[in-house]
Structure formats: structure tokens, C-alpha cells
Amino acid sequence: MSINFSQRSPLPKIKNLVLGETVGQGSFAFVKAACLESNPETVVAVKFVHLPTCVKHGLSEKDAIQEVVIQSKCSDHLNILKVIDCNVTKNFLWIAMEMAGGGDLFDKIEPDVGVDAEVAQFYFKQLISAVTYLHEKCGIAHRDIKPENILLDSDGNLKLADFGLASQFRRKDGTKRLSSDTRGSLPYMAPEILHSRNYHADLTDIWSCGVLVFVLLTGETPWEQPSRDDDQFREFSENCGNMVSGPWNKISLTQLNLVRKMLQPDPRKRVTLSELRTHVWYTSLVSFSDEGGRCNDPQLLSQKLLSKLHVSLSDDAYTQFMKDDFCLKIPTHTSTQPIQSEIADLRHDSFCASGRLATQHEFFGQPGSRQASNPDTEWTQQVHVDMATQQFQVNSIPEGAFISTSVLTKFYSHREMSSILPMLEYALRNFSIPVKTGSYETFLELRDSHKLEDVFPVTIQIKTMDRKGWFLSGNVSLSNAYGGLVLISFNRRSGDPLEWRRLFKKVSLVCRELVYVP
Ligand SMILES: Nc1ncnc2c1ncn2[C@@H]1O[C@H](COP(=O)(O)OP(=O)(O)OP(=O)(O)O)[C@@H](O)[C@H]1O
């Protein structure tokens, strides 16, 4: 799905708000930072849902509005993304929400590794707290709990978002309504959704939380779908959940016991939320949070997150990778697959253009940037404390790391565009991602037709199939950043985020000469 909303419809004006940079884009919507006209310190996020695109893909305007109505009803919890205001205009539904300054949770999960166990515990506690509030106070089941629908605030607290599939399972008189539709994302979906005629939607949320904890602890989903056609799920069912091989090996006993109770295929035997809240993983304190479960040491949390995030650019990794993966171009299960009909070329992204890249760090002001007075030291500090840069470092994590406010699938380059573009093009093409040759020449043409400082950002669209055969799309965006560096950012739009990060890591390794490592 290739959408350029800006070319199709101009953005509506929103009273009292000044729109800033684009902070994210999904299949139907994009999100911009905005601040109050009267108080620029107050920053919010505004999501613009493009209604014609929704309708084109079978989602009615009413469905899109219903999502906001439900989310507004349950906005009174620390771990649920707050809706502030919304309205419908000719082409857009806009929703002003609290800004999730820490970006997406999925972006902080290392594929095949997961996150630090204490970080997993912290997010498990916050998620169970949010789901308890949703079920017990609001009578609403989320029905699409997965890392892609979880954002973080700038202190790293979890914010459950995307209520597009949520439904009211408890009636006003307290009785429960059964569900019968097949909704959700297959790897996170409870088996009864596929196999039973009627089921309790709230119980399926507990299953999805179990899969999510599994992903946090291992960096992969336990199966593709909860059906007997899936080898992993069949093995799990045949062994009554007693799994010790593969990714299950990475989980310690206490957590394994917990995950198995949540992944109980019989919903009547599945652990309840109140039982989960008595589990030691829920009751014991996390070193970087207060009694209320809120993060009180974001720096420690960032360091713990970073301790698992690593992109190796070493000679060994490079040689091994070139030998095993890259030049062989083995199709089926080892690499991405082309979608032949679409060949991406380099484009000027007028929508995100803002001259020099205004990053969220600047928008909000981050530790280290406020006090810095010398522009040279300012950019070095910014780049060096950015989690994205630190993931390439082999040694210690420097003091001052902060929860990254934008995607981690990015690197800075100190090289010229004449080196960057051909190398990126070479890497992408060798991962079977169709990109037109001659992107540097295209860049020069674009530069001639724009003012030099206005040519950025330029983007290359990516549409491919991941190694499991699922659609994966997004773009690689090149912007001018601090100190003359070029920021190369891989922005996922749809598909498995773990696969997206795998792709980013491989491209970074192949293009390692481009990557700026302090
Ligand atoms: N409140 C927010 N604060 C900061 N960033 C946000 C916020 N809401 C969304 N984003 C960013 O925008 C991206 C796209 O938003 P979202 O996933 O809601 O769009 P969508 O089109 O509804 O998604 P989908 O493709 O799942 O249907 C998110 O991945 C996230 O990076």
C-alpha cells in the first residue's frame, strides 16, 4: 500500500495547535507532533486518519470514529494512551493525543534476544495494570495486544494504543457478551478465536499478553498462528505446553511458569487477571520504578534496554554474513522476497520536508541539549547519547543515554551522498528489494530542482516479503542532521517489526563503511 496523503488532500487546520514534524506513519494514518499556540511547551501528537484510504480498504468512517470513541472512554490510566480531542473533516479524522515521546515498544526489542528480564517484568506489570483497568473498570477488551500497538512515553512508561479492534464485552447490567468474529493478529491471537463459535474477548487479551511476554523474553513469537497447521503450535499443544527447546529455552523457570499459565489453550483454565496480580513477577518491585509501577529512573531503563540492543559491524560478523547469507541470495526461508511489479526510486519527501531535520529531541529538548551552548559540542552530544548510535558501540554505554524519541532502526553517516546512495542501493537490491539504479544521479536531479537545503528528506520505498512470506513495507529516509551528518532512517509502515529490525541490521552490516560510530 503506497500512500502519500499530502498529495491527495491538504491537512485540516486545528484551532489553537501549531503542527510540527511527522513522528510516525501507519497504513491509514500519519502522526504529527504539535504544540499549543499559547504555550509551545505543551506538546501533543495529532493523528490524521485518511478516511478515503480507510474506505478503500474496507474500513468505514464509522469504524474509524468508533475506535476513538472507545479509546476516549478508557483514557484515565497511566498506561493507556490518552485521547485529548478529535474531529472529522472532509478527508480526515484527526485525533489529538498525548505524545508518546519514547516511540514504539517494538523498536526496542532485539530480534532473537528480547529485552532485559527486568525490563520485561516492568512492561508486564504495566500491561497487566492497563488491561485490568480496561476489563474491570471499562468492560472493554482490547483484542489486538501486540508490540506494534504499544508506545512509550519519554520516561519509558508503557502506553497501550490502537483501539481499532476493541469491543465492549460487558453490558451495562454486568452480564458478559460473547464474541464470534475472527479479529486480531494471528501470532498473538488466542486459539478459541479461530476454533470456537463463541468466545470471551476479555480472556483472549490474557492470551495475547502471554505471547507479548514471550516476545519480550525471547525476541520472537512462539508460532505464526495458534492452529494445528502450525508446527510450533502443534508441538506446544501435543506437549501440553511443556516446551524446553528453541526459544522456550531462553525463558527462566519463574517466567516460564507464568507464560504457560497465560498461554493455556482452554480459556476456562487460563490464568485470570487477579491471579496474575498475585504472581511474584507482578508483586516484586522493579529497580527503576516506584510503588505505583511508574518509571522513576528513565536513564537506568534506557541503559537496560540498550544492554540487549546491538548491531554488530565487526569484521567477523561481516565475513560470516557475506559467506552465509548475502551473496548466496537463497530465496525461500532465509531472506526477504521481492514484489516484482514495484521498483522503488529515490524521491523527495515533500511531506516530511522541513529544511534541516528537526528531530523530536530538538522539539522537546532533551537532557544534554538544553545546556549545551557550543553548536559543535551540541551535535556531538546529541548524536553520542542517541540510543540509535549507541546500539553500534561495542563497549560501555555512555552516561546520559535517554529513551530514544524516534526510531532505533537508523544510523548517522559522515559520508557524502555520492557514497551513501550507491552503497544503500547495492545492499537493498541484494536483499531482493527492487530499487532503481542510479539513485545518486536522481538525487542530483532532485537537488537541481529544489534549493540545496530543501532537497532533504529523500526516501526510497521498501516493499517486500519477509522470510516467513509476510508483507513488509516502509521506507528508508535520508535527512540532513547535526554537524553535516546524514541520518538514514528505516521507517516501518506495515509488517512484522522484528523482521524490519532484522532487515535494518543486515543492511547496516553490508553498509558498515557508512555508519558513523563515535
Ligand atoms: N501518540 C503518539 N505519540 C507519538 N508517536 C505516535 C503516537 N501515535 C502514533 N505514533 C507513531 O505513529 C505510528 C503510526 O501510528 P498508528 O500505528 O496509530 O497508525 P495506523 O495507520 O493506525 O496504524 P496501522 O498501520 O497499525 O493501522 C506509530 O507506529 C508510532 O510510531
Image (spheres, rainbow, N blue to C red):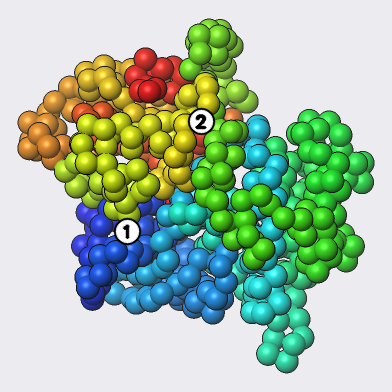
Furthest-bottom residue in view? 173
Question: Which residue: 70% across, 70% down?
Answer: 132
List the residue tagged with mark 2: 397
Q: Is residue 332 visible?
A: yes
On the rendering, which quadrant does ligand 1 occupy? Answer: bottom left
Question: Which residue: 83% across, 31% down?
Answer: 245
Instruction: Name the kind of residue labelled 1 in the image.
Output: Ala
Report whether 453 appears left or right of 19: left
Tell me: residue 336, above or below residue 12. Answer: above
Q: Mark 2 against mark 1, which lies toward the viewer?
A: 2
Disc 1, SS: strand
Q: Is residue 46 visible?
A: no
The quarter in which the C terminus is drawn is: top left
Q: Is residue 458 or residue 52 the one in the foreground?
A: 458
Q: How many marks?
A: 2
Report whether 117 appears left or right of 10: right
Report whether 17 appears left or right of 236: left
Instruction: Name the kind of residue labelled 2 in the image.
Output: Ile
Asked if ligand 1 lies within 8 A of label 1, the reply is yes
Question: Which residue: 55% across, 33% down?
Answer: 309
List the residue tagged with mark 1: 33
Q: Is residue 283 or residue 18 the one in the foreground?
A: 283
Q: Tell me where residue 432 appears, x and y as whole percent.
A: 45, 23
Q: Tell me where residue 361 appears, x and y as whole percent.
A: 33, 47
